[in-house]
Image (tube, rainbow, N blue to C red):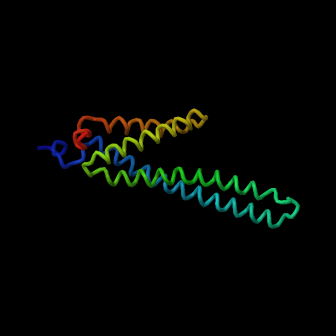
Amino acid sequence: MTAYQRPDVLPGPAHTVRTLMSIGGPIGIVIGLLLGTMMLLIIGGLTALETLSEATDGQVAPLMGGVGAVGLAFALIPLVYGIASTTLARLMRRRSRRVFWGVVVFNVVALAFLLLMLLGGDGLSVVPLVVHSVMLGLMFAPRVRAFYGV
């Protein structure tokens, strides 16, 4: 009996998805942390600017709040993506329908977000869009579905 025929071994297509998610997850975490750090530095700089400049009459404070909210969203999206991707990748060896559907839903949500970014003019979203499409297709391979009992 070869490795891919053994019921306790993760099938090749699922292993590919697991590997891709294990690579993308830490990248998302690092990007999220870097963006968060940059936003903290920008907010700190704006706070210092407001302290030094009394001529603004309080007009910098609303700007800081807006920059902080947008920056938080931009930092949280890749951070949450990275944590979810890494967690699901680690759980993929478990033969559970919840894990299967978790990976599928994760990839569908990522595809929807990337499609919105692509429609918004971000041409760099094409590569991750293709990668998530491939991962979604691999999850529905017969051996993968059989492994997870779907």
For this view, does 69 lie left or right of residue 25?
A: right
Quarter of the picture containing the C terminus is top left
Q: Out of 141 and 59, give the one closest to the viewer.
A: 59
Q: Residue 56 at what x, y percent from top left?
A: 85, 59
In percent of the image, x 39 and y 48: which residue is there? 21
Q: Residue 70 at what x, y percent from top left?
A: 64, 51
Residue 120's image quarter? top right
Residue 41's image quarter? bottom right
For this view, does 102 lie left or right of residue 66?
A: left
Q: Residue 112 at what x, y percent from top left?
A: 49, 37
For this view, does 66 lie left or right of residue 149?
A: right
For this view, does 61 lie left or right of residue 149?
A: right
Q: Residue 80 at what x, y percent from top left?
A: 49, 53
Q: Residue furthest top?
A: 119
Quarter of the picture containing the N terminus is top left
Q: Looking at the image, is 102 positioned above or below residue 83?
A: above
In percent of the image, x 51 and y 57: which residue is there? 30
In percent of the image, x 52 and y 35: which residue is there? 115
Q: Residue furthest right?
A: 55
Q: Residue furthest left?
A: 1
Q: Looking at the image, is 103 positioned above or below residue 123?
A: below
In percent of the image, x 84 and y 63: which residue is there? 53
Q: How many marks?
A: 0
